[in-house]
Image: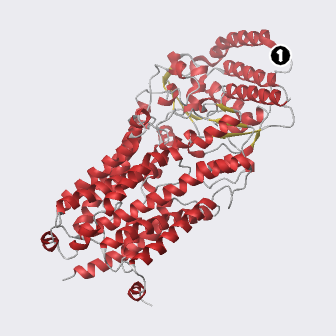
Amino acid sequence: MRRPGVGWLRGPAAAVALLLLAAAAVPAAAAAQGQARPGRIVSLDLCTDQLLVELVERGRIAAVTHLAADPAVSAIPEMARGISITRGVAEDVLRYDPDLVLAGPFGVSATVDLLRRLGRNVVVVPLPSELSGIAAAVRTVAAAVGEPAKGEAMLARFERRLAQLGPPAEPRPTAVIYQIGGSVSGPGSLADAALAAAGFRNMVAAYRLTRGGQVPLEVLIARPPDLLVLSSAPDEYRTVLADNLRHPALAALRARRPSLELPWRHWLCGTPRIADAIERLAEARAALQAHRQ
Amino acid sequence: MSAAARARRLGPARLLAVLGAAAVGAFALSLAVGPAGIGIDAGGEARSLILTEIRLPRALLGALVGGSLGLSGAALQGYLRNPLAEPSLVGISGGAALGAVLAIHLGLSQALALALPAGGLAGAALAMIAVVALAGAHGGPLTLILAGLAVSSIATALIALALNLARNPFASVEMVFWMMGSLADRSLAQLWLSAPLMLAGMGLLLTVGRTLDALTLGEDAAQSLGLDLARARLLVVAGTALSVGAATAVTGIIGFVGLIVPHVLRPFAHHRPGLLLPASLLGGAVMLLLADVALRLLQPVVELRIGVLSALIGAPFFVWLVFKTRSELAP
């Protein structure tokens, strides 16, 4: 992973210095770009919503998805509250007469094509499924919205938080992120990357999953991980699919072994906010290892 | 050897004993098979947890749900004197699923766990009353199927609407659960909720045997024998609503069990509806338990839902029945 300019920076003072630097850089960058800074920005993806809201002042944001203010899936629901909501179809996007549309790579290609044919400026952000891709996503959004310095500052804070975790101790404990319906986060997912960064081995590799990517409950009970991570509280969702999280056998397992509820808003999106998830996992790992000694 | 020839060699007690033994065997198989290995590939505490908290409720639910579906199929076919009557085909299962979905997504089942099977029961009863009202008391098999199709289409649409209105990120996956059913990872909690109602419903249905036997002679003949047909109708409606409603509320819609089982067993039951009822209860349990075992053995190769498997077995059978009914109805 690239860690630009972090080697010589350590501690809170450095962070403040970076922030000041970033703040000073903003007017300069804006001046350099003249009127190129878009002022009516629409975002079509939960993850671009979050980057946009953190990088740009409210006045320039025209609309985001309804998910941005949803505390179940958004890492920054309070910051996004009150911003207009787009339903994401081209007609609705055009209502805002956007001078920049941010989209993710998935699920909206027809809308993106149509908006481009109508002459709108659409930037498709490469949303990462690994930590090393976060920098590219942040830089793409920061450049598009005309806030490159803020983007660099955001990345520098992220790098600093990861660097503070230090190298994970061997042997690495195992963990599984167990979700509604028995789905688990496997290799190639952000959650898997977060587990690795926090010093865990994803136990999923040792299981025979169903074709749908689920771990049957009895397999989980037969070979439990050192740490069981639940992506939601058992009673968070009114759905029959969450019955697996309310299952007495899972409750019995949780009574015997360490488990952690780590809501998926912390690791759904590859933004620097995923450091929250990694830090909580790293704390759980430290507790596990302290308990063992 | 023809089915009839075989049937002659099997007395009623013998038939039920054979089916009972098959049900016990299928139940034991169901306990032995699972994703954690044949037997259980785990140590002490995990092993007993898997056996008592995961496989036992799964096997018990398989037996009770299969029994409910088989028995109610036999009772509906006998009472309506209609070879195509079956809980899922005539929309009763759909109504039950809708009731359960509403109970969950309106938060009723969180406030009171019993609201879940109660919702299933109410949905099943309403669907059944609607179907019988639509088809009319003397409608033929095809009218009944049409009425059932109408009711189950409405139920399916309303389930989809409810799941989408609930702003549930899992709406589409949950739809699959309700439409195709599942016995996977159900718990003793769901068993306790549904088993008493299923057993009560089965108890009611088993009492109508004598009336159904008399009904084979026609309604007038049955009434002249002093049988209370209105009471029998109430028992069939209540028994089906209780057993299918409670079953569907915890496992989703599992189709065709109530169609195949009575038809396969009818020659062995000497075409007597009264004997066919307990035989179909046991036969339904055997069929669903074995289908669920097959499902788990197939799992590494293909991922099937129990409702998909029962439809794969049942739908061709349904096609054959439609042909047969058509030729019998032909002028």
Q: Is residue A275 above or below residue B36?
A: above
Instruction: Report the residue at 60% width, 50% height from top.
Output: B52
Which colouring convention does the figure follow? secondary structure
Q: Nearer the viewer, residue B7 or A7?
A: B7
Q: Is residue A150 above or below residue A258?
A: above
Q: Nearer the viewer, residue A82 or A73?
A: A73
Q: Position of residue A161 (x, y in %)?
A: 76, 22
Residue B263, quarter of picture = bottom left
Q: Nearer the viewer, residue A129 or B202?
A: B202
Q: Position of residue A213 (x, y in %)?
A: 63, 50
The answer to whether A124 appears left or right of B324 in the picture is right
Q: Is residue A218 above or below residue B306?
A: above
Question: Mark 1 Cα within 10 Å, few/some/many (few <14, many 20+)?
Answer: some
Figure quadrant of the C terminus of chain A: top right
Q: Position of residue A23 (x, y in %)?
A: 68, 11
In the image, farthest residue toward the bottom: B1
The chain holding disc 1 is: A
Q: How many marks?
A: 1
The answer to whether A278 appears left or right of B112 in the picture is right
Residue A123 showing in the rendered view: yes
Figure quadrant of the N terminus of chain A: top right
The three-letter amino acid code for the residue at tag 1 is Leu
Residue A214 showing in the rendered view: no
Residue of label 1:
A9
Q: Nearer the viewer, residue A28 or A9?
A: A9
